[in-house]
Image (spheres, rainbow, N blue to C red):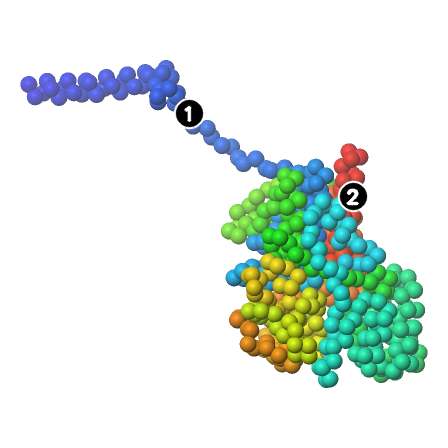
Amino acid sequence: MKAKRIRALVWLGWSFIVIAVLLFSSGTVQAGTKKMKPPVTKTGAEIAKYDAIVVGAGYSGLISGAILAKNGLKILVVEQADQIGGRLGAVNYNGYWLEWGPSNAKDFEDNFVIITDKGQYGFKAAKEAGADVAWVGPIDPLVLMHNVSDGKVVVLNADAEGGKKFYTEVLKLTQEQTNKVTATLKSLAAEDPEKWIDVPMKDWLATIKDRDEAFDKAINWLAIVHLALPLEETSTGRWIQMFKNPHRLYRINDSKVGGLQGLAEAYARVIRKNGGEIKLGLEPVEITTEGNKITGIVVRDKINVIQEFQVPVIVYAEPVWDIFSIFNESHFPKQMVENARKLKTGYKGDFWCKNIGVSRLPTIRATGKPDQYIGYNQVLFNKTIGWSIPSLSSKKAAPKGKHVLCLNGTTEIPGNFASAKADADALMKYMRRYYSDLDEIIEWENYQWPKVWGTGNTWLPMHRSPIEAPGVEGLYFVGNTVEADGTFADIGANSAMQASQLILQKRIKK
């Protein structure tokens, strides 16, 4: 009896298996009302395609991306750092926006937006991109010059009168000495800058007859003010360009983001509004070509996962010499490569910043009133050193009711952090003379050490990179390492506009 029961169970089990197989093979097994489908095998990920890719989300890269996106191109901006803005941007620190951007930003800028009087490239770029930039400025006066020896503060502007005051009231030159300096510089400003690009200031000085100690002192201090030292590495032609197109300083008061990060966000909003993308944490590792034409770019994230993009146009918005690590230098003319290598040698220097959070604005001892000056206070040590109050121009730079002071300067090359702190201490000592209540209002302090003071690179006596890469179709360079009219940030704005216009013109012709 037991054996019969077992045989019956085995027969029943096999019957269910046979029925199930028949049902599956006929395709009639259903899960509810949905038929079961065989799994789909994915053969490979599709490579994303764009009209143009911008490498670097600094000032010039964001301008390029915004202009191209506004004109209907499918745009991607890739940035190795975790935020946009580059060195011109700011980083959030417990509700305070601190200047100089993230440490891994590869571009370089100043901590003010510098716009040239005649070129006006920063304004033109914002208009061309349709970016709603909340400008503050021009800052008037341009700078307050503090003389440590006697405590005198001289108000200076970027005009002939400001220059004379600098020589007579700051440097204490006689009227005769001042006249000689101003006449010599006026004569230099009339020269063709191209003729003097490769000539260091030291060589130009050697051509001046009847030079004396006061004359050399004036030129040396001008170089300190403009971050153009040493004179043997400063282009005479670049100085002529500045004389022909003097600059003004601006800040940003964005309604959503603090400090100069508001400038970056204004352009990022345009990119996103027009369907563009910005991807952070991506490092370019290879540019691909067919013949002499750009075809794409390969990037990787922090864990080395690769992404490939197909694109006919790349706008390279990082220092020109960095491209040689992802695109063989044999693609470029020998002279361009040599210039880029030399340019890299100027990308040096130790730069420090001390940030101070205060409960209210400090009181100027001489007036008994809170400081309301939004520009730069330059102190006459024998190096570039000074401070500003970013929260005076940007409401979002500090929490409501609070303020932040930004002290900064350059150290000797090679420098070290101990010397940077010594410079900061010396500046703090002077500021305690200038303000009557500084120590009472300090709530926190920290140091930033960007190390590289990149704007000095602007002055090097050599030609920079062209905007359109010679011999490579679809590759463009923008930023402070390209040859374009302007000073500091305005070079980036001008080059971004020029590159974007070239790209759009070629697209229309096609």
Question: Are the residues tagged 1 and 2 within 8 Å (C-beta)?
Answer: no
One can see residue 163 in this view? yes
One can see residue 104 in this view? no
Q: Position of residue 417 (x, y in %)?
A: 59, 74
Question: Residue shown at 69%/65% (left/top)?
Answer: 374
314 in relation to 138, above or below:
above
Question: What separation in Å lies between label 1 and label 2 (alpha carbons)?
Answer: 51 Å
Question: Residue shown at 35%/21% (left/top)?
Answer: 32
Q: Position of residue 315 (x, y in %)?
A: 70, 47
Q: In this view of the protein, which residue sits in the foreground, 105 or 375?
A: 375
Q: Nearer the viewer, mark 1 or mark 2?
A: 2
What residue does disc 2 label?
A: 502
Q: Position of residue 26 (x, y in %)?
A: 37, 15
What residue does disc 1 label?
A: 38
> Could you say whether the residue bearing mark 2 is in a helix, strand or loop?
helix
Which amino acid type is shown beneath numbered disc 2? Leu
N-terminal label among 1 and 2 = 1
Q: Position of residue 118 (x, y in %)?
A: 84, 57
Q: In this view of the protein, which residue sits in the foreground, 39 or 266?
A: 266
Question: Residue shown at 46%/28% (left/top)?
Answer: 40
